[in-house]
Amino acid sequence: MKLQQLSLFLENRPGRLGAPLETIAKAGINILTLSLADTAQFGILRLIVRDWDQAKAVLEDAGWVVNLTEVVAVDVLDRPGGLAAALAVLEGAGLNIEYMYAFSLRRGDKAILIFRFEDPDRAIKVLLDQGLHVVDGEELLNLAS
Amino acid sequence: MLTELWNDAEGGFHPASAPDFLPEQALKQVQLRRLRAVVARAYANVDLFRERMQARGLTPASIQRLEDIQQLPFTVKTDLRDTYPFGLFASPMSDVVRLHASSGTTGKPIVVAYTREDVGVWSEVMARTLACCGLHRGDILQNAFGYGLFTGGLGAHYGAEALGATVVPISGGNSDRQIMLIRDFGVSALCCTPSYFTYLIERAAELDVDLRTLPLRAGIFGAEPWTDAMRDHIEAAAGIKAYDIYGLSEIIGPGVASECSAQAGLHIFEDHFYPEIIDPETGAALPDGEEGELVLTTLSKKAMPMIRYRTRDITSLISEPCTCGRTIRRMRRIGRRSDDMFIIRGVNVYPSQVEAALLAVEGTLPHYQIILTRDQGLDQMTVEVEVTPEVFSDKIRALEDVRARLAKAIEHILGIRVALHLVEPRSIARSEGKAKRVLDKR
């Protein structure tokens, strides 16, 4: 149920985002979604890709420090209050969200969100218990193709 | 014969090392005899030395005891620049068989000369250095010091040959080939700068070569100051013993002093290089054990004698006996040079202090660079630190925390505010020789 997310350290200056993306593109790896978090000085590029292990290898060969994290994809109704309802479930269970971002593709009337939880296994259990849909890697790949 | 009595603690044997074990009185006799000869030679052949001695009313006959050396004037680095290129030579060019020169980062380089006899002494002290580091005939030494005008490469080369070891004269750079040869040749010892070796460790890991599983057992590191923490890192990561050696071109090149198996200070080959410690402010001689600037006199150099040369290196002399059995005195490892030091907002700072702070936070030493700038008349110190896999996280907060802890550790040691920037891996230039830790843009 969990997805593997790659994170890269980037300096916050013009042109830095292009280099790792080019490395991945050259290896023929498709990016399913990405998010960029930044401070005044540096940023963290987070990627969900097909073939994360291959992507990690080519990035590390090119000299990047790559971190591997497990994240959870959840789909919520794409209408006002859809996300709030999902968050209410998580909050009720006392689950800590480190950060979240949206997946670039929609599924019907659902939007897919990527969550980084402190405890992904417990989060998945709570989400399933509450009847929310956790999207697994296979489904995401099918959506993107 | 003394030369036949001596044996090395680590099983090697090299007759040239005999003077390392001279009884104190015998050593002092050798030193006094050679000191008188070198002062006479400098006085007779080098204008600068003669004029300075005459100005103090001294002649070679003024040197009756070893302590009389304290009456002699100092020589400083600018004396070599001012007399560029050949002004301090005491031999005609027809007797000089070799010239070396410093890299000359500012203006003219410093030129040094060797007669055939000088090259022989240099080979001897470098053979003694390598024997001190436990090397002997049968060892394969990969010499990654740069060959050329820099004294490191050829100095280690001649010493290794004099010892009877097998030299691989690879010189500096070409790291992938360095690693290939270490593995394929079964290299047992390697010499280079400590910063370059830490890069080789990094590169070997990328190439999936585990240095700890190879025959490599000794690293002979010199040409720049390095910390004990850096030694611990090198020894653990490469599975070797890391020895500190010391030398400078003005005196002879590498071969002035070396650590032994005890790794507790560097034995100075004081039958050839007479050491003193002085107060760098007043020039007054300090007793053994007290910290000050190292001053060296070449006792046997022919082409270019140096009388009381101020090295700018800060250390102290250890006269207590060493567990290895050598009787020649030791000096503490050089942690800092008075000219590595920079002053920022009135505070004296040594790069080694910044290094200690980074090590304390990260556990290993990351690549870093200190950048000094001046903004509206105010000095700023920025430390750039490369992000390592050990500290990298997908969470902004965790990285901000690392950044803050690094900055705080440095500020705690130096007592001044610094800007700390995390930068991408490999964005700071790697050196194949001496690491450039400080970029002064003021």
Image (spheres, coloured by chain):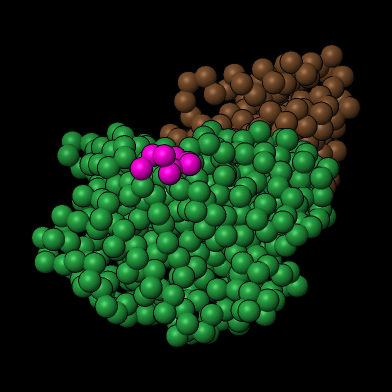
Chain colours: A brown, B green
Q: Is residue B395 above or below residue A29?
A: below
Q: Is residue B144 above or below residue B291?
A: above
Q: Quadrant of residue A16?
A: top right
Q: Is residue B419 left or right of residue A35?
A: left
Q: Is B139 part of what is drawn in magenta? A: no
Counting labels gives 0
List x then y, in percent, for residue B102: 41, 41
Residue shown at 75% from the left, 27% from the top: A58
Residue shown at 48% from the left, 61% from the top: B256
List x then y, in percent, for residue B119: 52, 51
Residue shown at 62% from the left, 48% from the top: B157
Camera-side residue of B7 and B353: B7
Placement of the N terminus of chain B among the 4 image quadrants: bottom right
Camera-side residue of A64 and B21: B21
Q: Is residue B215 left or right of residue B271?
A: right
Q: Is residue A10 above or below residue B116?
A: above
Residue A121 in view in this figure: no
Q: Is residue B415 left or right of residue B210?
A: left
Q: Quadrant of residue A76?
A: top right
Magenta residues span B92-99
Q: Is residue B27 left or right of residue B50?
A: right
Residue B247 in view in this figure: yes
Camera-side residue of A81 and B411: B411
Q: Is B93 part of what is drawn in magenta? A: yes
Residue shown at 75% from the left, 60% from the top: B137
